[in-house]
Image: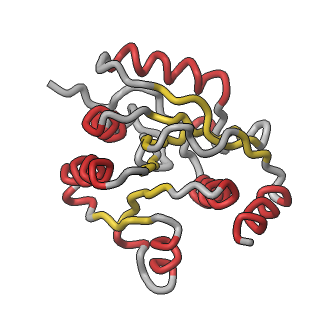
Amino acid sequence: MLSAIARFLLKIGGWTGFGGIPEVPKAVVIAWPHTSNWDAYWALVYKVSIGLDVKFFAKESVFWFPLGTLLRALGGVPIDRSRAGSTVQQAIDAFAENETFYFGLAPEGTRSKRPGWKSGFYRIALGAGVPVALGHFDYENKRLGIGPLLDLTGDEEADLDRIRAYYEEHARGRWPEKASPIEFHQKRK
């Protein structure tokens, strides 16, 4: 019933979904570009429409009643952003503890344009030994969904080149000028 309502919401919103639940039991699902508050709404509607049980971190401040109850039901896990380093390990541990597990996030970490992406999704996927599913928004053509799976090699530049090539062809944000470049913001040593 809930998935039918979600499909109806996508239809009246003018959206066409594509892809679906990844054909692997575990994956990090990323979504790009994240340029609007509407991105989270449409991503949640899409997830419900296909029946994808994906967990995601959200800042603690949005888990007030009654929104917090709804977010938890949709897969939300509150995080304390001041302890960001521990979130990568929490996600890796969740993959190890579950036979089937999907974890979603926006690698930009915000709707504002930044010098590049945060590397958490990459570290989680490598640490858990799972592929990355390339989800995206295409506001220009009103399409959203989950595209191909990408097995990371550990060569950050080569992996980002493959991600960039896919997104340049398929993804358009609501506010394209706010899309962060597909590169890691800070080079790790």
* Rendered view: 189 above or below 35: above
Q: Residue furthest left?
A: 189
Residue lying furthest top: 158
Q: How many numbered marks are there?
A: 0
Residue for point 43% across, 43% down: 26
Q: Percent position (x, y) of residue 165?
A: 56, 18
Q: Of residues 113 and 166, which is closer to you in this image? A: 166
Residue 8 makes an appearance in the image: yes
The percent position of residue 166, horizontal first and vertical second, equals 58, 22
Q: Is residue 51 left or right of residue 111?
A: right
Left or right of 159? Residue 80 is: left
Question: Measuring 43% from the left and 72% from the top, which residue is drawn there?
Answer: 62
* Residue 172 position in % (x across, y down): 66, 35
Residue located at (52% from left, 67% from top):
74
Question: 45 above or below 95?
Answer: below
Which quadrant does the N terminus fall into?
bottom right
Nearer the observer, 18 or 87: 18
| Residue furthest to the front | 99
Residue 178 seen in the figure: no
Looking at the picture, the colour scheme in use is secondary structure
Q: Residue 73's spot in the image, x, y percent?
A: 50, 73
Location of the C terminus by quadrant is top left
In this picture, residue 176 sits left or right of residue 3: left
Rendered position, 129 above or below 98 = above
Residue drawn at x 70%, y 58% as measured from the top left: 49
